[in-house]
Image (cartoon, rainbow, N blue to C red):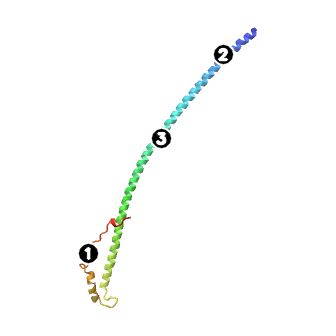
Amino acid sequence: MASSSGNSNSSGSTLLQNSGSEEDLHQLMDQRKRKRMESNRESARRSRMRKQKRLDDLMAQLILLRKDNYQILTGINFITQQYLNMEAENSVLRAQIIELSQRLDSLNGILNHLNNPRISNGVYESEAFESFTNFIHPFNYAYLNQPIVVTADVFQY
């Protein structure tokens, strides 16, 4: 029995050594687990900080882009208004050109008629001139002395 009690002492000390090494192993594992958890927390914190910085940068960029967009839209509206004003003015000028061209053609026709010694049917100018006297006399027709007046209000889009 002595041998069995001797065996029990040696196995008891082995158990104590094993339990001591197991406890050390558990402590080591717990320490590694705590370090890993701390490392993960720190990594998550850095990730949140990067994400927040990125969000802040995007918000600042959004504000700048909105400001630029507003300025561009304001410029477009201004240029569009100028364009519409020029179009209206051009329409008035085109109408004046047409009216003045017609008046010039009419006056050139009268001048050609007055400078021609014979009328196409063989009647002399002096005879025909009397019939046109009322036509070219400026006091007989009020429209010959009227100024050309055209406004942009006439041309509505």
Specify the label residue 46 is tagged with: none
Disc 1 crowd, CA 10 A, few/some/many (<14, 14-19, 20+) = few
- The residue drawn where x is 27% and y is 81% is 136
If the image is split into quadrants, where does the N terminus sit? top right
Q: Please state which of residues 135 and 119 is positioned toward the viewer in this rendering.
A: 135
Q: Are marks 3 and 2 in contact (CB under 8 Å)?
A: no
Q: Dot 3 lies on which element?
A: helix
x, y (%) of residue 58?
Answer: 46, 43
- Upstream in sequence: badge 3 or badge 2: 2
Judging from the image, what secondary structure is the residue with disc 1 in? helix
Q: List the residue tagged with mark 3.
A: 55
Task: Give the labeled residue for mark 1.
Answer: 145
Query: Which residue is under mark 2?
Result: 16
At label 3, the amino acid type is: Leu
Circle 1: residue type: Asn
Q: Quadrant of the C terminus?
A: bottom left
Give the quarter of the image for residue 122. Answer: bottom left
Which residue, as the protein is rendered here, is positioned at the far top? 2
Horizontally, residue 92 falls left or right of residue 28, namely: left
Under mark 2, the amino acid is: Leu
Residue at position x 50%, y 37% in the image: 50
Relative placement, left or right, of 4 versus 90 is right
